[in-house]
Amino acid sequence: MSKKITIDPVTRVEGHGKVTIYLDEDNNVKESRLHIVEFRGFERFIQGRPYWEAPVLVQRLCGICPVSHHLAAAKAIDVIVGAGTGDGLTPTADKMRRLMHYGQIFQSHVLHFFHLASPDLLFGLDAVPEIRNIIGIAKENKHLAVMGIMMRKYGQEIIKATSGKKIHGTGAIPGGINKHLTITERDSFLNGKEGQNIDQMIAWSIEALDFLKEYHKNNKSFIDTFASFPSNHLSIVRDDGAMDLYHGKIRAVDTNGKVVINGIDYQNYTDIIVEGVKKWTYMKFPYLKDLGKEKGWYRVGPLARMNTCDFIPSELAQKEFEVFKHYTKGKPNNSTMHYHWARLIEVLHAAEMMKELLNDPDILTGELVIKGKKQYEGVGVIEAPRGTLFHHYKIDNNDQITMANLIVSTTNNNDPMNMAVNAAAKEMMNGQAQITEPMMNAVEVAIRAYDPCLSCATHALGQMPLELTLKDINNNIIDKKRT
Amino acid sequence: MNKNITFTIDGKKCIAKQDQNIVEAAEDNGIYIPTLCHLKGIIPSGSCRICNIKSNGRFMTACTTKVQEGMVIENNTEEIDELRKIIIETLFVSGNHYCPSCEKSGNCILQALAYKHRIMIPRFAYTFEVKQVDATSPKIYLERNRCVLCKRCVRSIKTKDNKNYFAIEGRGYTSQIILDKKLALNMSDEEAQIAMKNCPVGCILKKEKGYIEAIGTRKYDKIEIGTEIEIEA
């Protein structure tokens, strides 16, 4: 008799999610599905709102990476106010926005690695939930926990200084930015005491990378093979092939590293990307039009970005990038757990970029906003911490938004996350009749590697949100556990 | 002959000019009486009732009442504070006010009053009325979800030949603010900007610009509403 295991809910950040794992008569995994079961409706209720409100309103769909939505929407609205497609802003506006973005990348990646992922690495998949959290980290390795908290604080302060608030600021406005950085703020970020300065951030970024590389050395098999599978990879890159998390053109490579999409202006993203739908989830399934639904799905995020870019334009991160590329002999890296490695290289890159921007006088003075001839449609794309993020708006003659389409990073990673869940389930659950704590956590670890918004709550203190239910074919509950 | 008037507010001796209303007389003496529909320089209407004070055992609106010799005014009492809170809460529940994404946030008098009166959540049920926005004029986006029908725009924004740009349409429950479509075609940027500024909430928005003031620099980011009156005294 075939059975069904349900993990419900997996999270509560981008709405609630659950995982269903279908077992055959011999308790072998047949299929796994990650469902997003809550409808948000942002694309609908933004209709009728004035276009200049989009960057502030739409960012409310997320509390973890609102800056990414704020900036992607602002970039789309830049097009509408005739300020160009991402590269037409004043130097001050461009650099302030970049500083905001790198602050966001830095704090979000740090939050994920130290608060959410590191407990798995430090304590193992089978550790009891009571210690598998940031408090457990603080007891076991105080320095690591302090480092994580202080690094995140730094990124959050950068966001506050550039957007007005740590969460849901208003800094990016159509055609530019609404403030400069003050000299006091700049000096504090460059030379602040008690670990709150940029050189300390760079040093700690390297230390975090060393921690992960050491763990990798001792757990090669797990890190290299767990929940891994071949895939396409997609991101934006700069015209010269450099990693650029704020602006660039779309590039995609296939599982062998062959460039299948290159130099595509994201204003034309609908020419290359199609969004598929399935009945059992509210989350769509984007794929590359040319490769079709079956073969065209792709990964986004830190791992994908390492596979699509030619180099990283900051000295220390480039050295780490070379080590990363050398590990797979220049071929695309398809190891799911290597997302963590790639993410920490980006942490270092973000720190270096922040230092460069903080030393740039343009952030202290200069024109804040430009405008040109009004357009009625605009697309904004940015590399959010979790991957490529698309915002697309159309407006009417009354300046009201008539259409909005958002493809968020987690949506881009929908197929890969389902693949990862399936791979983890097969590895841990094949032939098992009962749900165990390590089994449940293994599924979470596979999802967590992608750092979807779904992962945010999985190491929450107090009541854990993950629930697994084992059902027979008639929907009768055989076993039920909460982590 | 101009003669000064003496009176008290909460026991404090005050001096006012003749014909001054209580709100402005209080302000001259460093005392803040909360207002919403009142706008200096235009004829007060007393419609929002937030400036309610008590004198001789009776409630009255401070913006429409002229100060009298020997008046004994109660302003900062538990009873009046509670009355004002109730009024503010009813304004919140009868509109659709979403401060987090509103561009008037930080400059909004209704929001500032709610903070001043420590309102965390209204005690009354939200009505969630369906209100239509009007974006058809070239300069103004009329966001009726936030309108408190104070009529500040009706009273203060006029054409050069003294015609009203704004008016109230309908009666009672169905009242709504409207903008004269023909006159609005010739509204200047400056007039639109003043209309937005005079609106105490985020109902009148000047088109194509938003969130220009950075968080931290907005009027009520730095000090609580009314504090500037008390400080200046």
Image (cartoon, rainbow, N blue to C red):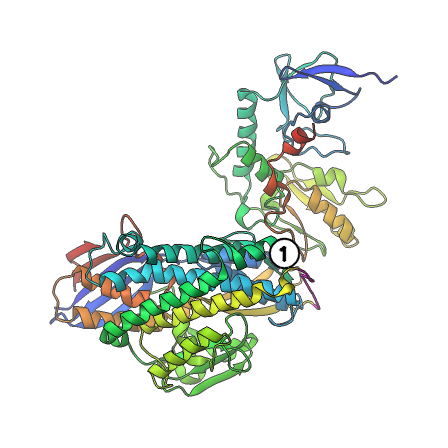
Instruction: Please check the rendered image and state whether residue A10 is part of the magenta-colored stretch, yes or no.
Output: no
Residue at 15% across, 57% down? A479
Question: Considering the image in quadrants, where does the N terminus of chain A appear?
Answer: bottom left
Q: Where B135 falls versus A387 (above or below)?
A: above
Figure quadrant of residue A425 = bottom left
Q: Where A410 falls versus A236 (above or below)?
A: above
Please indicate whether residue B171 sits to the left or right of residue B164 in the image. left
Main SS type for the magenta part?
Answer: loop
Q: How would you rate the neighbour count of disc 1 (Cα within 10 Å): few for under 14, some for 14-19, many for 20 or more?
A: many
Q: Which residues are magenta?
A: A365-373
Question: Considering the image in quadrants, where does the C terminus of chain A appear?
Answer: bottom left
Tell me residue A251's x, y (percent).
Answer: 48, 80
- The chain holding disc 1 is A
Foreground residue among B156 and B194: B194
Circle 1 sits on which residue? Answer: A179
Q: Where A476 falls versus B132 (above or below)?
A: below
The secondary structure type at the circle numbered 1 is loop
**Residue A239 visible in the picture:** yes
Tell me residue A95's x, y (percent).
Answer: 60, 66
Foreground residue among B224 and A422: B224
Figure quadrant of residue A470 = bottom left
Label 1 amino acid? Lys
Please indicate whether residue A70 sits to the left or right of residue A34 in the image. right
Tell me residue A268's x, y (percent).
Answer: 55, 77
Figure quadrant of residue A240 = bottom right
Residue that extends furthest to the right in the rendered view of this protein = B1
